[in-house]
Image (cartoon, rainbow, N blue to C red):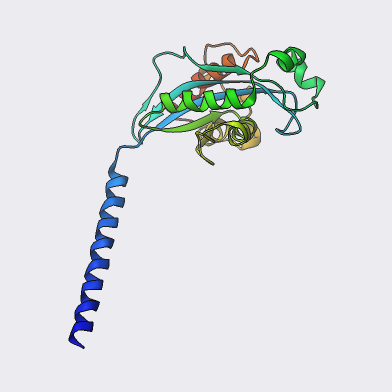
Amino acid sequence: MTQKLLARATDAETRGSAASIGTAEAKSERELPVRDVYFSADVETDGPVPGPYSMLSFGLVLAGTFDGSRFTRPQTYDGGFYAELRPISNTFQEEALRVNRLDRERLVSEGQPAGVAMTEASEWIAGLAAGGKPVLVAYPLSFDWTWLFWYFTQFSAHGSPFEHSRCYDLKTAYAVKAGVPICMAGRSRVPESLKGSHPHTHHALDDAIEQAQLFANIFEWEGR
């Protein structure tokens, strides 16, 4: 009987020690410095949804970091990532091609395979985000996120660098700070004072840079 009681006491102490260690490790992880590393993204496609249609190009640029108290803009928007991709299907919309002005026939023969482009993009993001957590930024987020998340999960050897939900919707951020409903928060309604100086050209990297400048301005803006 005494041996059983001692065994139970020893088991309880062991479980208590393990729980204490687990709590200490969790606390230690929470106390580690964490920062978001933002990447502004723009995609050009030949249709509305990935799978039946193709992403023809995309651009990514470092847009800033935030540690919970301090936001830091990048010193330069040079050195972004840009890729033109080989279409993955034969289906496309002429209207989409008129907007982005990409030569789809050229990309059929000259575009990068999706696996190569998405793996290289994943590695580029990981290199710049070392020590931080990559977060995707877009305006509106829903379109660009849908395409990039699908392509990363389908084709990148590393999966999605933004996992399943690390993303920042500029449209929502502007609506909240401006005090307007989402339906009144389109890009055309953003004040000129918040817009960046980089031109919007429908070239994915140009538009990612323009959006990164807008993102920093909205992030630092105190609102109305």
Where's residue 44, x and y in %? 67, 21
Residue at x-position 54% and y-position 27%: 119
Q: Quadrant of residue 183?
A: top right
Instruction: Check the picture and name the quadrant holding the N terminus.
Output: bottom left
Q: Residue at x 51, y 28 (%)?
A: 122
Q: Along the horizontal axis of the image, is 133 left or right of 115?
A: left
The reply to whether residue 101 is visible in this rendering is no
Residue reaching furthest front? 3
90 sits left or right of 198 in the view: right
- Image coordinates of residue 53 in percent, x first then y, are 75, 29
| Residue 82 placement: quadrant | top right
Q: Residue 27: percent from the left, percent from the top?
A: 28, 50
Compared with residue 23, is residue 197 higher up or lower down, i.e. above or below? above
Toward the bottom, the furthest residue is 1
Left or right? Give the position of 16 relative to 188: left
Q: Nearer the viewer, residue 183 or 66?
A: 66
Q: Quick one: 97 or 82, which is closer to the camera?
A: 82
Q: Nearer the viewer, residue 192 or 18?
A: 18
Tell me which residue sits at (27%, 67%) in the image: 15
Residue 60 visible: yes
Q: Is residue 10 above or below residue 59?
A: below
